Image (cartoon, rainbow, N blue to C red):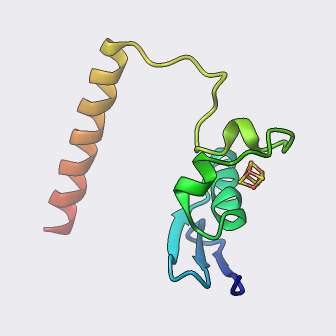
Amino acid sequence: MAATRKVCDLERKTALVVSGSGKDFEMSIATPIKAIRAKCLDCAAGSSNEVRLCTVAGCPLYPYREGRSPFREKPSPERLARLRENAKLARNARQAVLA
Ligand code: SF4
């Protein structure tokens, strides 16, 4: 397997993972769960499918490998609708600032 190189930009809170497989990616490391996801992608040479299929159930990161906590309740349909509306408002505000 080819070498993997990571470049962390702590100011932007992102990690650029340059893997030998050609699946380079940049991701936010703004939260611990995102950092775990980045570590799992690093472990699986950048393949999200390999992370999903990981068989190392004894790994402490295993429950969190897909970028979310299995112990957290799913949001209700009402909360999902509110979250979508807030995201839409934020997107529109960002576009207005950039325009
Ligand atoms: S859970 Fe699997 S993919 Fe994630 S770090 Fe552990 S062994 Fe690697």
Q: Give the residue displayed 71% in from the left and 35% down from the top.
A: 63
Q: Position of residue 89 (x, y in %)?
A: 22, 40
Is 95 left or right of 2, judged from the image as shown?
Answer: left
Q: Quadrant of the N terminus?
A: bottom right
Q: Position of residue 85 (x, y in %)?
A: 23, 31
Depth check: give the residue in front, 98 or 63: 63
Q: Quadrant of residue 94?
A: bottom left
Is 89 left or right of 38, judged from the image as shown?
Answer: left
Total numbered circles = 0
Q: Position of residue 84 (x, y in %)?
A: 27, 32
Q: Quadrant of the C terminus?
A: bottom left
Q: Give the residue displayed 59% in from the left and 44% down from the top.
A: 66
Depth check: give the residue in front, 89 or 4: 4
- Above/below status of 19 relative to 31: below
Q: Quadrant of residue 9?
A: bottom right
Q: Quadrant of residue 57?
A: top right
Q: Give the residue displayed 20% in from the left and 68% down from the top.
A: 98
Q: Give the residue displayed 56% in from the left and 17% down from the top.
A: 73
- Above/below status of 97 relative to 11: above
- Above/below status of 98 relative to 33: below
